[in-house]
Amino acid sequence: MSVEFRTRDFGYPVAILRLRDQFERSQWWSLDRLVAYQEQRLRQVVEHAYHHVPYYRDLFRSLKLVPADVRTLSHLDKLPRLSKATVRREFDRLQARTGKPSRSHVYSTTGTTGEPVHFLLDKSANVLEFVHYWRHWSWAGYRLGRRFAEFSSDHFLRRAELAEQPWRYQRGLGRLLLNSIALTPERVDQCTGALRKYRPGFLKGLASVLYAFARLLEERRTADLTFSGIFSTGESLLPMQRSVIERVFRTKVYDSYGHMERTVAITECRSGGLHIHPEYGVLELVHGASGEGTAGILGTSLHNFSMPLLRYEVGDLVETSSSPSPCACGRAMPRVQRIIGRQEDVITTPDGRVVTTLFLVFNHVAGIALGQAVQDAPDHLVVTIARSEHFTRHSEADLRRGVRQFVGPTVRVDIKYASLDELRPSPGAKFRSVISHVRSGTGSPGTPPGA
């Protein structure tokens, strides 16, 4: 998912500037020097996990290991993989016990499995995230303080009165938030009006939202909006989507991959290279199970000490290159060929809404262990959920209200219940939170409009 920056998370100017200075220099290091930095951070994290995290202390002892046994990247395979199921089950024992007041907060994500995972992030992890995106955006010419626009659903779902606001400008951050709950024709006009008023230099959003917005502008023959760069986050960016977005806005799209647990990061440079960021975390590629040319991802935290994750099964895939060549940008960071992350269907409604982020509704209702929405007709949506122990008599009403905010009044919504085992995908398959079997006027079933 794309990152929602909040003041409470990133109000550490001294730590941010210090890490920013280092990251500005380290992006030009040799690969050997980058690996040396990784291994230095890895030793710190392993030592900390062994002494302060009950889960890892017991794991190391059961394997007859001590921190000195895991000092290099090649030593990591002495440890078992950490699954999302284990993080759910061992949430308490994965938390560091340092005896000091914690500045950490609980976060959650559904990722590509659909089932929520809860974890802690601390000051160090949040400073890392801010600096990482600052550096990546600077590759497109961004400078801190310049205005930018961002499509968001989460911000407008926080309170009922925000859901109908088309946009909101945060003057102190120079950020124009655009409501992507549903891209209706009226909301598109309001968003373009705000973009013309504030003239942000950059635009950020989920790939599907950026693409849907570009298509709607193209249909309206709107040609006066352009940016210095566009940042695609949170989903797989398809070549067709990139082509349309770059054509409509007459600028380059910079793709990126990350996840809320903050163990790995991949971003695109001006030359088109998809670079793994070694200073961010350790990314291990697992070949074999996912087919030739693709690999699963294991991630290891290098900055989050409140809940370090070692060899974490992220759940996404990347396409690798058999003969990597140096990138024209001059950076020695390793690269992948393509990112294969979350890909959801788009819901289109009889009243003209284009809904790209319906999967977020499951994050905002208590007691949903897993949820899936299937559109089987233009005016009909079936929402199936598996309930957890926190589901209450209010949860279904909250779910109906949340879905209605996205799809509006012209779609009939049926809610069904299933067990976790019934909803879970088969082993090795990705879970799809949103599925559409409806052919819209500009698209085909299971694809964004215009595909």
Image (cartoon, helix red, strand yellow):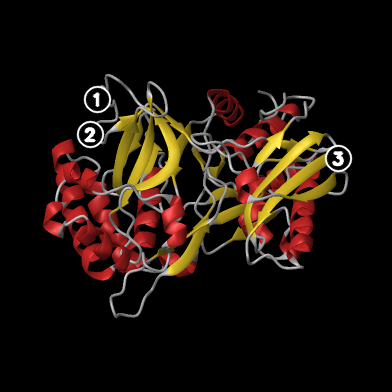
- Using the image, tell me which numbered label, if any, was put on residue 332: 2
Q: Are circles 1 and 2 on residues that touch, CB within 8 Å?
A: yes
x and y, in percent, of residue 17 in the image: 30, 61
Task: Kindly identify the residue that appears in the image at 60 percent across and 46 percent down.
Answer: 421
- Using the image, tell me which numbered label, if any, was put on residue 222: none
* Nearer to me, 416 or 275: 416
Task: Kindly identify the residue that appears in the image at 58 percent across and 28 percent down.
Answer: 241
CA gap between label 3 and label 1 equals 50 Å
Label 2: how many residues lie within 10 Å, few (<14), some (14-19) or many (20+)?
Answer: many
Task: Kindly identify the residue that appears in the image at 59 percent across and 46 percent down.
Answer: 199
Q: Amino acid at mark 1?
A: Pro
x and y, in percent, of residue 320 in the image: 35, 26
Q: Secondary structure at mark 2?
A: loop
Label 1: how many residues lie within 10 Å, few (<14), some (14-19) or many (20+)?
Answer: few
Q: Is residue 260 visible?
A: no
**Residue on which disc 3 sits:** 351
Q: Secondary structure at mark 1?
A: loop
Q: Residue furthest left?
A: 68
Q: Is residue 256 left or right of residue 98?
A: right
